[in-house]
Image (cartoon, rainbow, N blue to C red):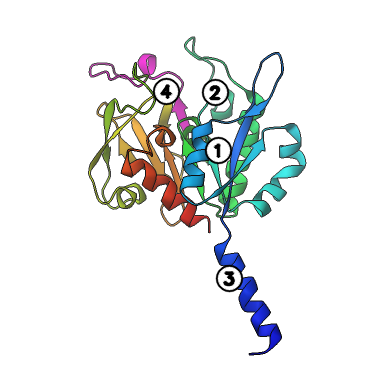
């Protein structure tokens, strides 16, 4: 074998052994000393699934100049949980139950969502992140579940338990990405920390998980390399929950 062929094989082996870079949005905290942060459990879940986490600060420059470099650097993106999405982005006026919003973060994440979708980059949205995916692709959300939905069969979407503890079940739609991730199971137990949720899925998205009160708990896009939004928080559950671990494993694998 010639020297050039050996070098090419070594280079290919190195590429195959490299971990995929997973971009995770880091929002600016509004404290005495502002800092760009994201939850520790998002990073740990990505790392344990075989990815290399890269925190992406939500700054004005990210929208104006950095988006193309993010797309070049990262094999896929995690849109994490957080505060409410500003209703102006989906054509509504605020209701009294709306809580604090972060317009800069909204703008960065919505821009990233659309750019990633255009380039068919894998996307995993968690809680707020699922809502961002839906709004970014043309859908809308409930600003406040208790005041905007039928409460004849209410469940606690803001659970009073610790983060890793499941509080309700999600019915999984058959023959979906989520169904395959969960090994064909029709129901899984999830945690819940939200008062907003997907109302009408965006064009191209389908609901793949429903709460007992029919609130949409998961959306995905068929015929896309990997696009999944879940309303619960698998990053808190993966150490002891196989379905949660499989979400991150399947996502990281799609980013290779």
User: Which x, y percent locates residue 194?
Assistant: 42, 23
- Tell which circle, 3 or 2, labels the residue nearer the N-terminal end: 3
Q: Residue at x 65, y 72 (%)?
A: 11
Q: Is residue 144 magenta?
A: yes
Which numbered marker is on residue 136? 1
Q: Secondary structure at mark 1?
A: helix
Asked if residue 149 is positioned above or below residue 117 in the image, the reply reads above
Asked if residue 55 is positioned above or below residue 119 in the image, the reply reads above
Q: Residue at x 60, y 65 (%)?
A: 15
User: Which x, y percent locates residue 101?
Assistant: 58, 20
Query: Foreground: 111 or 6?
Result: 6
Q: Is residue 198 left or right of residue 133?
A: left
- The answer to whether marks 1 and 4 mark residues whose Cβ atoms lie closer than 8 Å is no
Which numbered marker is on residue 13? 3
Judge the density around disc 1: few (<14), some (14-19), many (≥20) Cα neighbours within 10 Å: many
- Tell which circle, 3 or 4, labels the residue nearer the N-terminal end: 3
- The answer to whether marks 3 and 1 mark residues whose Cβ atoms lie closer than 8 Å is no
What separation in Å lies between label 1 and label 4 (alpha carbons)? 19 Å
Asked if residue 151 is positioned above or below residue 248 in the image, the reply reads above
Query: Foreground: 158 or 238?
Result: 238
Residue at numbered disc 4: 194
């Amino acid at each position: 074998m010639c020297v050039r062929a050996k070098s090419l094989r070594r280079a290919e082996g190195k590429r195959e052994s490299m971990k995929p870079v997973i971009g995770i949005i880091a929002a600016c905290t509004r404290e005495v000393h502002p800092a760009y942060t994201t939850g520790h459990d998002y990073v740990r879940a990505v790392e344990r699934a075989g990815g290399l986490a890269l925190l992406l600060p939500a700054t004005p420059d990210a929208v104006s100049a950095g988006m193309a470099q993010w797309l070049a650097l990262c094999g896929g993106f995690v849109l994490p949980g957080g505060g409410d999405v500003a209703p102006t982005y989906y054509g509504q006026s605020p209701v009294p139950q709306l809580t604090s919003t972060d317009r800069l973060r909204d703008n960065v994440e919505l821009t990233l969502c659309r750019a990633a979708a255009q380039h068919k980059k894998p996307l995993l949205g968690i809680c707020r992140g699922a809502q961002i995916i839906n709004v970014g692709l043309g859908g809308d959300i409930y600003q406040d579940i208790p005041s905007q939905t039928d409460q004849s069969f209410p469940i606690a979407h803001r659970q009073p338990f610790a983060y890793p503890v499941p509080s309700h079940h999600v019915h999984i739609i058959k023959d979906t990405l989520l169904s395959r991730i969960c090994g064909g199971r029709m129901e899984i137990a999830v945690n819940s920390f939200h008062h907003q949720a997907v109302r009408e899925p965006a064009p191209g998205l389908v609901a793949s998980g429903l709460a007992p009160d029919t609130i949409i708990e998961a959306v995905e896009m068929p015929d896309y390399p990997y696009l999944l939004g879940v309303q619960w928080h698998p990053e808190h559950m993966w150490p002891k929950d196989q379905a949660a671990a499989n979400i991150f494993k399947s996502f990281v694998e799609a980013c290779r």
